[in-house]
Structure formats: structure tokens, C-alpha cells
Image: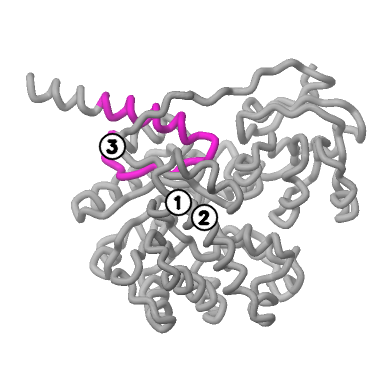
Amino acid sequence: MILIRGIGTNPYIGVGKVKKIVTLEDLLELDGGEIVVVSKASRDMLSHLQKAGGVITDYGGITSHVAIVLREFGVPCVVGTGKATLVLEDDEIVTLDGKTGNIYQGFMELEEEKEFLEIFNPSTRIKVNLNVPEIAGRVAPYADGVGSLRIENIIIRTGKHPQVLLDEGELTGVLTDGVREIVDAFYPKSVFFRTFDIPTDELRHLEGGEIEPFEHNPLLGSRGITKDLNNPPILEAQFNAVKNLLDEGYSNLALKIPYVRDISEYVKSKKILKKCGVRPHQDLKVGVSVETPSVVLTFDEFLKEGLDFITLGMSDLTMCSLAVDRRGVNVSKHFQITHPAVMGMVKMVIDQCNQADIESCITGYAASDPRIVKKLVHWGISSISTNPDQILKMRRLVNLAEDEVLLSNFSKRNI
């Protein structure tokens, strides 16, 4: 019997006793293997949630950071149930289907989705999104690089706000050590290091997080490069970590500036990078994550300023284009990542990148959606950066999509 439904975020199945989480003490009491039920999961919980048998939340969406990281850890997760904390009871046995979003009463024999074992090698590069360093060695042989290295989890695991680590003189060192593990595992394949993009509500949980302002919609608030430019020492600490790794000989590192709203932010970021002793586009490849309509509609300015690559963040681009909170349960039906307006902007950027011979890469949730990936391959995108558990599937899917393109072009020439 189905007890409740939510949004499935991965293909994994979990069975176990329900453990409701209300306080930090509840998290500390986890033995491992429980089905954790919580109103809202935050990044600071991840060190505890990774040992859960499954995670169910009242709020949150498929593109939430917690859902993405749990997928990397192979933890079944269902989000956005709306009322799991009210419906489910402590210690009852449930089965969680991370694919369908169904929560069943008792033990159900469900089969997890299996990976394709054959490895395809399409012309379009198949990269991976990474949040945690320890899985880098396992996925590096199957990926053509890292399209988005999200360094936030490296910091959050310390339990300290970046400002606290900076004041203690530890921020650059923590980042250097965490990123080194990844660039070393992937060397000489490229790794796109993304500077901080942590919403204020997720920073408030950390030691020293009380300095963060309260925002009603943090995803449209102080985040990404805008936030770091308001506190240059934090940005400099990240750039110094990049310089340390370059000095150690890791030439496969590249720098990505996230959630850019205006060309001026990109220009200022590069000036600070140069101040830290790294010459943009010479010592290091530099690009931006295209996540706002303002960047799409002024993309020619970014091309003139200089770009070595770009990535496309379609979840944020959808949120900003359609005026829909990507974490909002009540408006989730309006969050249409394949909306014509969003897809139209994506094609505009890919076309301009191809004309300028610049790498374009799709990252995030969209890079695991077969419908979107096939379309982007037909449009000529350079690379796909998907979740670790989707690498082999995307290799097969993209290989088939490229065959379709070749067949279509051959047919046109022979008409």
C-alpha cells in the first residue's frame, strides 16, 4: 500500500525503520540504515544523512543540493511529499522508491535500475558533476572530466562558516586539500572548479552563520559571485587555493564563475584573480555558468571580454526565466525546465559558442534528462556533465543521439 508520494530524485530503493528528525540530537542518534524523515534537509545534515537507508522530506525539489549529493552517495531520496512528517510514524517499516517517489508500507520487493555495462565513446565529452572528493577515484575512469566541481560541501563538512575558516587562516588550506584529491584523480582531464554558490539559509546552520541575513527567497538573494564580490577576502581565499594547485602542477584545473548577473561581475572577478597572481586565460582557463537571462541576452559582451568555456545551469535559468521558486512545492508544476523560453535561450548560447569555438557544457539536473540531452546533442553542445551514477547511461544515450545526427545529415545530402 502506498502511504504517501513525493518526487523521486534517484533510481535507488530503500527499506527500513522510520526515524523522524526534529533536532540536531536526533541526527546524532542515527545508527545507520534508518529511513530519515525530515521537514527540510539542509547541507549541514549531509555528513549524517549519507549513512541513512533513505531520506524523505516534506519540502524541497529534485534540483536541491541535498538531493544531488545523496544521489552521489547512492542514498535513496524522495522530496516534496508535503506531509511525510505527519503521515509517517517512528519505527514503522517503509519502502522508499527513489525513482517513482512512492513510499510503501512495509517491505516491498522492488528492483533498482541497473547501469549499462558497455562503455560507449561518443564525440561529445561525457563529464561528471562532483560534490564530494572521495568518489573521484571511482568515477574518473569513466568520465571525460569534471564539468562542475561544487566546493561548498568541502566547507560545510567542517561545520564552520567560510568567514570563520578565513579568520582562522584555514579556508585556503581546506579548499586546496579537498580539490587536490579530485584534480589528482582526474589528471590530465579537465576539472571546472566552481567558486562558492551557497544560499544564505544553508550558511546560517554553520558555526558563525549568524552573520548571514534572513532572506525569504535565498535562491534569488545573496549568492554566487555577487555574494563573494561583496566579501573579496573570501573570493581571494578560493583563488589562492586554485593558485596553490596550479603551482603544484595541476594544469587540468579551470575556473568557473557561478550565478553571474552582469558582465561587470565577471570583469571584477578576473581582476581579483589576477591580483592573486593568476593570469586569466593564460595561466588558467576561465568561464562562466550561464544561469540568468541577463547573461544570455548580453552574451556577446562576455565573448568580447574573453571566455574559454561556459556551462549551462538550466535549473536556475528556468527559475529566473519563469519566475518560479525551484524549491517551492506549491509552484512545482510551473517549474518546466523544457519550457520553450528556456530551451530557446539554451540554443542561443550553444549556437554562439559553436560560432566562437568555445566549449559549451550542460550541468546539473538537466544533464541527466534524456529528452534534454538528446536535443542538446542535436544542437551541437560540446559536453554533458551528469551525475556519477548516470555516466554510462549518458555515454550510450549520447552515442545514439550522435548517430541520429549523422543519419539525418546523410539523408539531407542525398535528397
Q: Are marks 1 and 2 in contact (CB under 8 Å)?
A: yes
- Residue 326: where, in percent of width, then height? 58, 47
Q: Nearer the viewer, mark 3 or mark 2?
A: 2
State whether residue 359 is above or below residue 377.
below
- Residue 21: where, in percent of width, then height? 85, 46
Give the residue at mark 3.
Answer: 123
**Residue 186 circle label:** 1
Which segment is the magenta one?
378-404
Q: Nearer the viewer, mark 3 or mark 1?
A: 1
State whether residue 187 is above or below residue 408.
below
Give the residue at mark 2.
Answer: 182
* Residue 338 sits inside the magenta stretch: no
- Relative to 204, 347 lies left or right: left
Q: Which quadrant of the figure has residue 358?
A: bottom left
> What crowding class fits label 2: few (fewer than 14 Cα within 10 Å), some (14-19), or many (20 or more)?
many
**Residue 216 circle label:** none
| Amino acid bearing label 3 | Ser
Q: Which quadrant of the figure has residue 78?
A: top right
Front residue of this view, candidates 31 and 299: 31
Q: What element carries label 2?
A: helix
Residue at horizontal 69%, vertical 72%? 212
Instruction: Look at the image and tell me in which quarter the C terminus lies.
Output: top left
| Amino acid bearing label 1 | Phe
Q: Earlier in the sequence, mark 3 or mark 1?
A: 3
- Relative to 243, 305 lies left or right: left
> What crowding class fits label 1: few (fewer than 14 Cα within 10 Å), some (14-19), or many (20 or more)?
many
